[in-house]
Image (cartoon, rainbow, N blue to C red):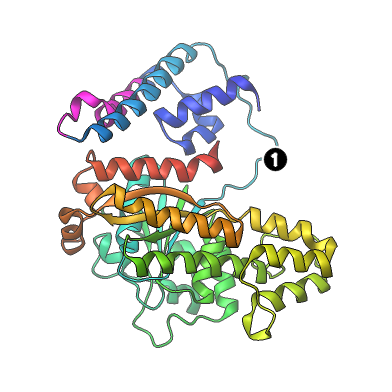
């Protein structure tokens, strides 16, 4: 990538959004008024002098962000007169736009997944990104309530049952920015969709005309939930400081990795290399405990692959290294309380699964946020400049940064 173009994209990401930074036509169309307007809006959010009633840590975060925003504003203001359409060429054979898919999961219910999914969707939408929130908690769908809708006209089952309906036909606009694809838990067996239907849904989600898709998953480790999680560009596992919760979070991560390996050669996998029958059978034997050869340690797993199918070790290593889940600790009364659970999960995952887990952030327990679940108004919409909104803003930038720039 051209160095000057890369600098332009970084500046646009801070002043506008990572999605805008990716859009070459947007960079070409920039003018001084657009840059000034964006800077004023960001200054309201991040200028530390406007938020003196917050904690020192939060003010420091705002200050650090504001410095980067100000530098981006100054850089773009200088460059706006210099660059021309010839400086930023559209890539030839531009691939079809695909949304960034974020899945929010966990092995335990009642930890705030739907509430966070709804507010994250609103936060992304507030950045000017076309965002679609999808409720894939198929047996306990309630995401629509957190986005202010007591009833939805169409849901996932309509997409399955009516051949004439595409995925976009069941999307509804909410009053708070994002679109919604609702679930339906009122039908017997709603959570047990056949594999062919799941495959249809996974493919359709990746064709949605949007910048971001945020998926709310059910609190279990069923194959459906794991496959939805693995299909996302970014997988977020939620937990609390409660021991049962963070143990379940580790369990979710572990079985998700085993599911990824087990389905490495399946039609839903993004693996496009040669299928090796010996390797496929060996992996399935070791990832399905009922076969009697199951392993709980990835070092042992790799050793067996190396011994019995050495040509497949590179494929397995690539699959494992490509699994990089994130953790959010929700409902924290004290940030220090989250340190030990996160550290424990990271250590065990590194030791037994040989993977790294990124600690995205801690989200505080706030009475107002809990009340917003009853008023059916996302808290980010009520307090768009508050500490919770700032945390979600930073969270979303992290989730998008590795993909966009």
Report whether residue 353 is seen: yes
Q: Position of residue 11 (x, y in %)?
A: 47, 25
Report whether residue 177 is seen: no
Relative side of 365 to 89, left or right: left
Rendering quarter of residue 306: bottom right
Rendering quarter of residue 110: bottom left
Rendering quarter of residue 311: bottom right
Quarter of the image with the N terminus is top right
Secondary structure mostly seen in the magenta stretch: helix
Q: Position of residue 254 (x, y in %)?
A: 54, 66
Residue behind mark 1? 93
Q: Is residue 1 above or below residue 373?
A: above
Q: Nearer the viewer, residue 5 or 83?
A: 5
Q: Position of residue 118 (x, y in %)?
A: 32, 57
Mark 1: few/some/many CA within 10 Å (<14, 14-19, 20+) = few
Relative side of 85 to 367, left or right: right
Residue 49 part of the magenta-drawn span: yes
Residue 43 part of the magenta-drawn span: yes
What residue is drawn where x is 70% and y is 67%?
Answer: 301
Q: Is residue 253 above or below residue 364?
A: below
Question: Hey, which residue is sitting farthest bottom in the picture?
Answer: 188
Tell me where the magenta segment starts and ends, as one range: 36-53
What residue is drawn where x is 17% and y is 64%?
Answer: 374
Q: Secondary structure at mark 1?
A: loop
Number of residue marks: 1
What residue is drawn where x is 80% and y is 67%?
Answer: 275
Q: Nearer the viewer, residue 381 or 157?
A: 381
């Amino acid at each position: 990538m051209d160095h000057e173009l890369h600098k332009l994209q970084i500046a646009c990401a801070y002043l506008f959004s990572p999605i805008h930074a990716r859009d070459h036509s947007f960079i070409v169309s920039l003018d001084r008024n657009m840059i000034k307007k964006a800077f004023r809006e960001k200054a309201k959010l991040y200028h530390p002098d406007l938020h003196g009633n917050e904690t020192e840590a939060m003010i420091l975060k705002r200050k650090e962000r504001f410095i980067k925003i100000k530098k981006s504003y100054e850089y773009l203001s200088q460059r706006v007169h210099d660059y021309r359409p010839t400086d930023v060429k559209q890539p030839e054979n531009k691939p079809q736009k695909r949304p960034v898919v974020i899945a929010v999961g966990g092995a335990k219910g009642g930890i705030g997944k739907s509430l966070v999914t709804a507010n994250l969707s609103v936060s992304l939408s507030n950045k000017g990104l076309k965002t679609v929130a999808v409720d894939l908690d198929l047996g306990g769908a309630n995401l629509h309530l957190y986005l202010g809708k007591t009833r939805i006209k169409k849901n996932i089952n309509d997409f399955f049952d009516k051949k004439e309906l595409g995925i976009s036909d069941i999307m509804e606009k909410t009053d708070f920015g994002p679109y919604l694809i609702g679930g339906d838990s009122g039908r017997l067996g709603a959570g047990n969709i056949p594999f062919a239907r799941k495959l249809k849904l996974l493919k359709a989600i990746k064709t949605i005309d949007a910048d971001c898709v945020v998926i709310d998953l059910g609190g279990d480790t069923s194959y459906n939930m794991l496959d939805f999680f693995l299909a996302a560009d970014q997988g977020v596992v939620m937990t609390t400081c409660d021991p049962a919760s963070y143990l379940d979070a580790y369990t979710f991560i572990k079985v998700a990795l085993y599911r990824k390996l087990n389905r490495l050669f399946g039609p839903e996998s993004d693996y496009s290399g040669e299928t090796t029958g010996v390797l496929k059978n060996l992996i399935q034997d070791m990832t399905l405990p009922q076969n009697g050869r199951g392993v709980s340690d990835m070092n042992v797993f790799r050793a067996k692959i190396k011994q019995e199918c050495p040509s497949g070790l590179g494929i397995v290593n690539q699959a494992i290294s490509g699994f990089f889940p994130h953790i959010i600790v929700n409902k924290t009364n004290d940030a220090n309380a989250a340190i030990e659970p996160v550290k424990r999960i990271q250590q065990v995952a590194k030791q037994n699964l040989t993977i790294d887990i990124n600690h995205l952030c801690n989200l505080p327990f706030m009475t107002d946020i809990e009340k917003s679940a009853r008023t059916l108004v996302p808290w980010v919409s009520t307090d768009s400049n508050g500490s919770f909104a700032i945390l979600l803003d930073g969270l979303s930038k992290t989730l998008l940064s590795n993909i966009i720039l």
